[in-house]
Image: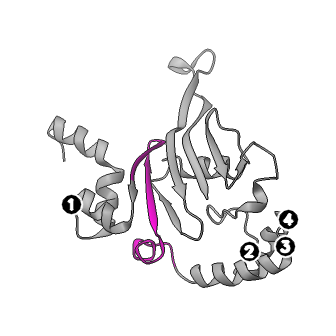
Amino acid sequence: MIIVDNLHKEFAKLGKPKFGIGKKTVEKVKAVDGVSFAAQDGAILGLLGANGAGKTTSLRMVASLLKADSGQIQIDDVVVKEGKTASQSRLGILSDARGLYPRLTSRENIHYYGKLHGMDKDLIAQRTEQLAHWLDTTHIMQEVERLCDTVVIVAKGKTVAKGSVPELMEQAQESDFEDAFVKLAFLEKQATNAGNGSH
């Protein structure tokens, strides 16, 4: 089981000097601002959100590649610490195409990363077959509906909704999951626009 509890991460962003002269400004960017979720053993959890929502930063912290400013991550009985390999052999995360080797097949990439994380060769073979079967698909909402037991929607670094696909559709009062996702992921923006009389 993976438990992510109230993760926070800020980055410093250099801005342009005021009026084009002087020193560059430093702006704090809250990439993750309270993300929480639990991924059950043997279940598929989908982490969805618009670009810049905080998904990749959250997953990098789960994979112990990046230190959280605050919050806690636990994988089974191991508390995740940046750079510590004790938790890395207990999970596999593939956030997007970065880090994949294009000359390797999907199965070869899965096998390679299993070995890299110190997994047993029999477990690598088992997980490769399982993941290859699951990943024989595309990254569209219909696939999320079909594959995910739980979906967590992140917006502006915060967990804004979580549940099964039917639960999220009910929460958004939508009969189509893509419409439900848009409504939930951009709820704050819609509320602001409605308050301003914009559409």
Tag nearer the camera, 4 or 2: 4
Q: Amino acid at mark 4?
A: Gly
Tell me: residue 143, above or below residue 184: below
Q: Residue at x 73, y 48 (%)?
A: 65
| Residue with the mark numbered 3 | 120
Q: Which residue is mark 2?
A: 110
**Residue numbers of the magenta segment:** 138-161
Alpha carbon separation for disc pair 4 and 3? 7 Å
Q: Quadrant of residue 120?
A: bottom right
SS class, disc 2:
helix
Q: CA distance from mark 2 to mark 1?
A: 38 Å
Location of the N terminus by quadrant is: bottom right
Q: Return the residue at label 1.
A: 173
| Label disc, if present, on residue 118 of the rendered structure | 4
Q: Earlier in the sequence, mark 4 or mark 2?
A: 2
- The amino acid type found where label 3 is placed reads Asp
Compared across the picture, whether 194 is left or right of 53 comes to: left
Instruction: Using the numbered discs, state the Cα–Cα distance from disc 4 to disc 2 in whole angstroms.
Output: 13 Å
Q: Nearer the viewer, mark 3 or mark 2?
A: 3
